Image (tube, grey):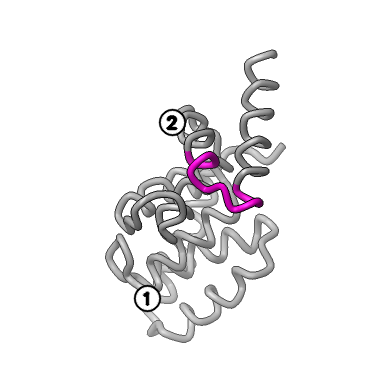
Amino acid sequence: PPARADAEDEFRRGLSAYNTGDYVTAYRLWLPLAENAEPRAEAGVGFMLFRGLGVALDDKEAARWLTRAAEHGQAEGQLMLGLLHYYGRGVQRSYVRAFAWCELATMNGNADASLCRDASLESMSGPDREEAFRLVVELRERQPARK
């Protein structure tokens, strides 16, 4: 479909702008894509809000976009959301949720997420660990099918 090709072109234009440090342009290009549930754009917008790149730093708004990306199966969004939960930035601190999102990110191919996952696990007691393992299964069942 042409709309999908246009969205891909817009995402790539945003990525090119991001990679050259033109964060304002990247945000402008990615926000409409994110609003239309493009997971990479959701993660990009969330990361830019988290770091204050081209926009005002906003942990709560970053968490909102990263949650959307994570729920859409986007591994970098899952890692970033896990980190937000680990540090309690923009969301309530939860090692259980940090573990679950970082474990999903690991399962989805993000090698960096294992550090967050392991640190979260070490911060939990037995009952929290059981809850964390249960949450991984629950969240994984809600993920979109991998293409």
Label 1: state its secondary structure.
Answer: helix
Q: Which residue occupies the extreme top position in the image?
A: 2
Q: Quadrant of the N terminus?
A: top right
Q: Report which quarter residue 125 is drawn in.
A: bottom left
Which residue is drawn at the image coordinates 65% and 60% (left, top)?
107
- What is the spatial separation of the Cα atoms under label 1 and label 2, in whole angstroms? 34 Å
Query: How many numbered discs sit on the rendered protein?
Result: 2
Tell me the crowding category of disc 1: few under 14, some 14 to 19, or many 20 or more residues within 10 angstroms, Cα based.
some
Label 2: state its secondary structure.
Answer: helix
Which residue is drawn at the image coordinates 40% and 65% (left, top)?
84
What type of secondary structure mainly makes up the magenta span?
Answer: helix
Which residue is drawn at the image coordinates 66% and 55% (left, top)?
108
Residue 33: where, in percent of width, then height?
Answer: 52, 31
Q: Is residue 24 magenta?
A: yes
Q: Quadrant of the C terminus?
A: top right
Q: Report which quarter residue 109 is drawn in.
A: bottom right
Looking at the rendered structure, the kind of residue marked 2 is Glu
Instruction: Say if mark 1 contacts mark 2, CB within 8 Å.
Output: no
Determine which residue is flagged by label 1: 128
What range of the chain is rendered magenta?
Answer: 18-27
Which residue is drawn at the image coordinates 52% and 53% (left, top)?
77
Q: Earlier in the sequence, mark 1 or mark 2?
A: 2
Disc 1 vs disc 2: which is toward the camera? Answer: 2
Residue 38: where, in percent of width, then height?
Answer: 55, 34
Decide if residue 119 is on the left or right side of residue 11.
Answer: left
Determine which residue is flagged by label 2: 35
